[in-house]
Amino acid sequence: MTIGIRKKITISFALFILASTLIWFLNYYKYQLLTEKLQIIEKKDHAFNMILEARRYEKNFFLFHNTEDLAHSIDYIKLAEARLKEIISVHGRYTAERDLKAKHQALLDYLGALEALTPSPGNESASEPPNDRIRDLGRIMTDDFESMLSQERRQVIQLVHESGYYLYIALAAIFVVTFGIAVFMYFNINTPLKSIETAIDKIASGTYAGIPAIASGDVFESLITSLNHMIQELNRRNEQLVQSEKLASLGTLTSGVAHELNNPLNNISTSVQILLEELEDDNLAFKRELLEETEKQIERARDIVKALLEFSRRGAFNPKPTAFKELVSKTLKMLKGDLPANITLEVDIAEQIRVDLDAQRIQQVLINLIQNGAQAMPDGGRLTISAEPPDGENQFCFRITDTGSGIEKEMQGKIFDPFFTTKTDGRGSGLGLSISHGIIELHKGRITVDSRPGEGTTFAVCLPNRQASETS
């Protein structure tokens, strides 16, 4: 039978409360016992002092035969007897000496012996007192009370020591229970929550990796299972968004592609018309030249269509060594008709740069960033694409810089959020930079932005690279 997290927490706190309560009751019992012992010592000490006073007057009586001394001795013994009786009735079960009734009887015997010395009415003369017996009874009572006081004091000292031990034991028990609950909380609550928090942070940043499953058998296992189902659905829908953004990008490329296809088709049409007109002539070299030019134009149109098909195709993540300048050139051919004539394009990329990347996905990043740069310069400007060869840490970086209007500082932290756009004319879906960010993270890289309003914007993309630079 699996115990749920709520029951585990309830049981843990119940054990903690039970242990704390037992420790409290134990310490409270020791406190009460110590209080009783202190009261017993106080009362026994008082009774002992009364007996000592009685013995002093007893000695005076035997020395001077003054009946007032005998009366004082009897009075003190009665006070001691009353105090001992109080100890028996109130604190009897807490005293170190268990046979207090015998001590009480001995005290009564001593009192009776003293009272027997009192002259009776009508006979004022006192006989020679049996002082040896009374002295023996008095000495016994003194020794007994002194012994009882010593026992009580030893027990008090022992209780004080035990209270110290119990305090340390209580602290150790509370520490062990608290440590156990902390360990339980960490592994059964904090660790699953941390996994969920990390996963949610990744989801917020656009990375939809699943949460590692846990076999806790409680609500967290069910929650993580549900979250993983949600992440799978988000992954599926994210792929749909990526594909939709591709189709949207294709839509914006339509005019440029039409222009790119129109040029080779016009050349093909012109060449075919000339061939038809010169069909009867014997100038085979000229006809061959026209046919070769036609073949070149057909190949050019085929490359354009192929690039479009590759860009729109939905494929698995497949990084492989790629000539980066060639990839940029293909991308610019697709975008050529979409870039305004008042924008100056500069490409600063070495021919020999080859890097590990998914060409299809990085091409989408390039299209998004180039289009964003062009749209940021409606009045014209300069768009620069540059790349650095992989460094000593095998990191490859490229940058796309425009001289446009820039991005406000408070907006720079939001530009990679899904559906966030600064365009107010309906030209942006708010998905381009978010999808680009996801593609770069898929490559285990990073994308950053440096923008100054009124001066321009630079997007820098850095990717890990295992492909060493090659010289041509």
Image: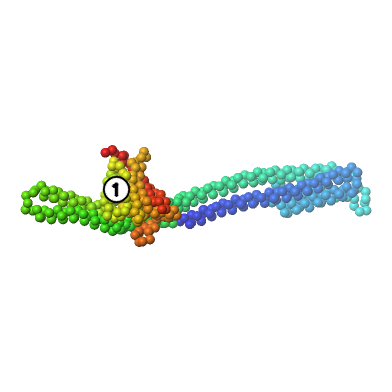
Q: Nearer the viewer, residue 331 or 198?
A: 331
Query: In the displayed structure, does residue 386 sit left or right of residue 294?
Result: right
Query: Where is residue 109 shown, x and y percent of the image?
Result: 80, 49
Q: In which quadrant of the rendered image does the N terminus lie?
A: bottom left
Location of mark 1 (residue): 328
Tag 1: amino acid: Val
Query: In the displayed structure, does residue 346 sit left or right of residue 66?
Result: left
Q: Secondary structure at mark 1?
A: helix
Query: In the displayed structure, does residue 407 sit left or right of residue 159?
Result: left
Whether residue 294 can be seen here: yes
Q: In which quadrant of the rendered image does the C terminus lie?
A: top left
Q: Quadrant of residue 260?
A: bottom left
Residue visible at 48% across and 56% down in the picture: 7
Residue visible at 45% across and 54% down in the picture: 410
Query: In the displayed structure, does residue 15 sit left or right of residue 340?
Result: right
Q: Nearer the viewer, residue 211 or 125?
A: 211
